[in-house]
Image: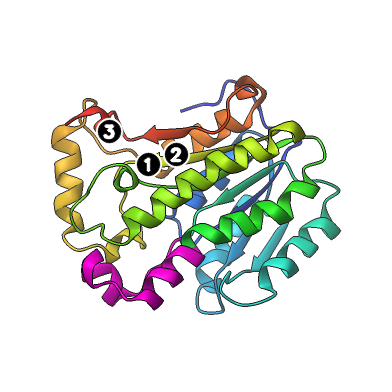
Amino acid sequence: MNAPHRILEGRRALIVGVANEHSIAYGCAKVFRELGAEVALTYLNEKARPHVEPLARELGAALLLPLDVSQPGQLESAFAAIAERWDRLDILVHSIAFAPKEDLQGGLLHCSAEGFLQAMDVSCHSFVRMARLAAPLMTEGGAMFAMSYHGADKVVPNYNVMGPVKAALEASCRYLAYELGQQDIRVHAISPGPLQTRAASGLKDFDLLLSDAVARAPIGELVDIMDVGSTCAYLASPYARRLTGSTVYVDGGLNIIA
């Protein structure tokens, strides 16, 4: 789909969570670049770096930074690098989530306290910590996005502990939207339909979830990472300057079906 014009010209975006070319975060970065934004990307660790570096080169990323939010100091170091390179930040995309496999696949009832806390810290509270660091850099206002899923609102079999965690993430987006509104910073949770990403592969029977989505969605097809990126681009643009605090579904209408 050709962009009508470069509605993000001059904007600067930090996209957290690119793992490979199938990542939702990569879709966001790609659309932002097509619409004129500068982008900075992060990679999880040295194992992930060879998969992300070519994408950063392709996008002409201004920065490629290591970031494991579970490691003390890495988040602060990443934002210090952003502040040194850019005089401001306009867009933040948080597209990371994690739960230990045994806790993710064992059902909520049997999720360990340690696993629950780790999932909550990486998948939810890290967004709050990012927002705290990003807000002072958004001197001309901005937009923040966190990736959720319909399992935050309704029970999705096998989504397990991530359901409550994503529900907390969506609530955090609403409260951050309230707290940051006076600084002209808008915050949204984005809820894509099922996508074939590396993170999703950890869910039991995910292929069945994909086929069910195609069968039941009013549009009758799966969304892709570029659909998610385009939605975020619109919400980050001046066209959406009065929108904040929403959970925005990008799922072909699947969420409206009982």
Q: Amino acid at mark 3?
A: Asn
**Which residue does the image show at 23% across and 72% down from the upper left?**
110
Query: Which marked residue is nearer to the observer: mark 3 or mark 2?
Result: 3
Position of residue 101 measured from the top left corner of the image (x, y, whole percent): 30, 74
**Lower position in the chain sequence, tag 1 or tag 3:** 1
The residue to which callout 3 is attached is 255
Q: Nearer the viewer, residue 252 or 105?
A: 105
Assign a secondary structure to mark 1.
Answer: strand
Assign a secondary structure to mark 3.
Answer: helix
Position of residue 161 measured from the top left corner of the image (x, y, whole percent): 31, 62
Q: Nearer the viewer, residue 13 or 248?
A: 248
- In the displayed structure, 221 sits above or below 61; it is above
Q: Is residue 213 magenta?
A: no
* 222 horizontally vs 183: left or right: left
**Which residue does the image show at 64% across and 59% down from the upper left?**
129
- In the displayed structure, 37 sits above or below 121; it is above
Dot label at residue 192: 1
The residue to which callout 2 is attached is 228
